[in-house]
Image (cartoon, coloured by chain):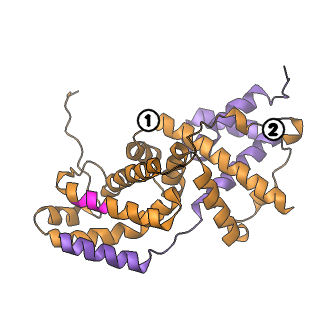
Amino acid sequence: MTTKPYPHQECLRLFEKLSEFIDDELDAVTCQDIEQHLKDCRACTACMQTLKKTVELSKCTGSHPVPETFSENLKNLIRKMS
Amino acid sequence: MKKNQEKKTIHDNDTKLIRAINSGRRELFYELVKRHEHSLYNFGLRMCGEPRDAEDMVQDTFLNVYRYLDGFRYETRFKNWLYRIATRACIKKRRKSTYAPEKELSLEEFLPSDESQIPDEVPEWALMPIDKLLNRELNGMIRDAILALPEKYRVVIVLRDLEGFDTAETAQISGITPVNVKVRLHRARLFLRDKLKAYFNHDD
């Protein structure tokens, strides 16, 4: 049996809740506990920051224009129906 | 408390237009399409990957909306209802293709596998401002990573983080509980983070 060098139990609990923490979906008491833990734990701080940046990056990837031909065909189809 | 409480009626930017269409002004339907075509197309790209599949999804969705619009009860934002139909169209499209079977993501697979993996400081990329990080290549990599996600996780991260729906709306649109939305979203984000870590470490 391999022994994994596991983070502290509190770190594991935080790991599960990280997304909710970032999204501000946790109650005030839990938030405070997490903030306190983050002050003392560099590993969890790194974990939280990388996840936060991941979310920020995915929100900024931008969009593509609708292809003109498709848009035109769709318009004609809808106009025919309605 | 009354057992059969009346459901709230939502008024949003589309309400007036939909009421007009449903009162007989069917020619106004294209106005509704114009409003949502761009965002729906991009939702299709994020979910299906191929422009042709996104186009098919958009067309199928609007045809279904046209067919069932007179049954719309204004109990939700029109956009949420539209995306519910679109999500089903994406899932239906995928089932016809020959992708690999869906895989479950577990929390454990995202934990450090040994001591050397436990970070002791925040990596540089996580501290840089977004405008210094984002470029065409990274955009493409994030898009590909999201497409590599098993569908049930992809739906949630696209709806929550890319399309901007909240937890309750995402649950309503995707037909799962809010708790499941949160669980799947977290795993999807961890999956994406792993791809980003590999990408930035490779650049070092």
Could you say which chain is coloured orange in the image? B
Q: Is residue B63 magenta?
A: yes
Q: Which residue is at 61% across, 58% downward?
A: A58
Question: Magenta span covers which residues?
Answer: B62-66
Instruction: Tell me if I can see residue B135 in this picture.
Output: no
Q: Secondary structure at mark 2?
A: helix
* Circle 1: residue type: Thr
Q: Which residue is at 83% across, 56% downward?
A: B201
Question: How far across and down, in percent of the image, does residue B65 sit?
Answer: 26, 58
| B133 with respect to B69 (left or right) | right
Q: Which residue is at 38% across, 43% downward?
A: B172
* Circle 2: residue type: Asp
Q: Taking A21 as reference, is B146 above or below it?
A: below
The chief SS type of the magenta part is: helix
| B22 with respect to B195 (left or right) | left
Give the residue number, with chain letter if any, for mark 2: A40
* Quarter-of-image position of residue B62: bottom left
Q: Is residue B67 magenta?
A: no
| Label 2: how many Cα within 10 Å (few below 14, some 14–19, many 20+) | few
Give the residue number, with chain letter if any, for mark 1: B177
**Front position in the image: B171 or B106:** B106
Question: How far across and down, in percent of the image, does residue B138 sit?
Answer: 69, 65
Instruction: Tell me if I can see residue B160 in this picture.
Output: yes
Q: Secondary structure at mark 1?
A: loop
Furthest residue toward right? B116
**Front position in the image: A25 or B100:** B100
Question: How far across and down, in percent of the image, does residue B37 sit?
Answer: 37, 69
Furthest residue toward left? B24
Chain A shade in the render: purple
Q: Taking A13 as reference, is A59 above or below it?
A: below
